[in-house]
């Protein structure tokens, strides 16, 4: 999922096997740095009562941008806190 798909795009599954396996799964590979966009991105995967899931993959540069030590075991929690600061 890229930033261009965050707002105004609904994804639809036309495959019952995929729906039965858990629905649409989004893999975000860029840093979503504010809460509003994060909520929009997570909302793209499960619409109108459909199942879906969402995961973010961070790289070292994302942690550098947010000034978080990549070795910090609380790194993902800190990303969430930084995102709230940018709301």
Image: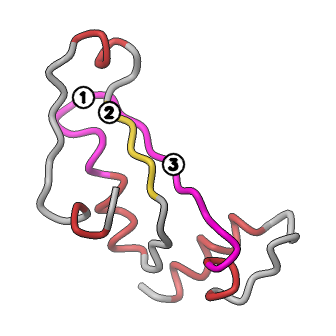
Q: Please state the extent of the stretch shown in magenta in the rendering.
A: 43-61
Considering only vertical position in the picture, is 37 above or below 28? Answer: below
| Numbered tag placed on residue 24 in the rendering | 2
Which is nearer the N-term, disc 3 or disc 2? 2
| Numbered tag placed on residue 62 in the rendering | none
Q: Residue at left 80%, top 73%?
A: 70
The residue labelled by disc 1 is 50
Assess disc 3: are there few (<14), some (14-19) or many (≥20) residues with their C-alpha within 10 Å of its C-alpha: few
Q: Residue at left 64%, top 86%?
A: 66
Q: Quadrant of the N terminus?
A: bottom left
Which is nearer the N-term, disc 2 or disc 1? 2
Q: Position of residue 76 (x, y in %)?
A: 69, 64
Which is in the foreground here, disc 2 or disc 1? 2
Considering only vertical position in the picture, is 41 above or below 17? Answer: below
Residue 45 lies within the magenta run: yes
Q: Are marks 2 and 1 in contact (CB under 8 Å)?
A: yes
Q: Are marks 1 and 3 in contact (CB under 8 Å)?
A: no
Considering only vertical position in the picture, is 20 above or below 66? Answer: above
Q: Name the element at disc 2.
A: strand
Q: Residue at left 20%, top 39%?
A: 47
Q: Position of residue 13 (x, y in %)?
A: 19, 27
Q: Quadrant of residue 8?
A: bottom left
| Numbered tag placed on residue 55 in the rendering | 3
Q: Are marks 3 and 2 in contact (CB under 8 Å)?
A: no
Which residue is more in the foreground, 34 or 4? 4
């Amino acid at each position: 999922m890229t930033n261009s798909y965050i707002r105004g795009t609904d994804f639809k599954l036309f495959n019952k096997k995929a729906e039965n396996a858990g629905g649409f799964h989004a893999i975000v590979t860029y840093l979503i740095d504010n809460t509003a966009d994060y909520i929009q991105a997570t909302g793209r995967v499960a619409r109108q009562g459909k199942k879906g899931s969402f995961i973010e993959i961070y790289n070292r540069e994302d942690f550098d941008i947010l000034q978080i030590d990549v070795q910090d075991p609380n790194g993902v929690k800190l990303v969430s806190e930084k995102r709230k600061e940018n709301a």
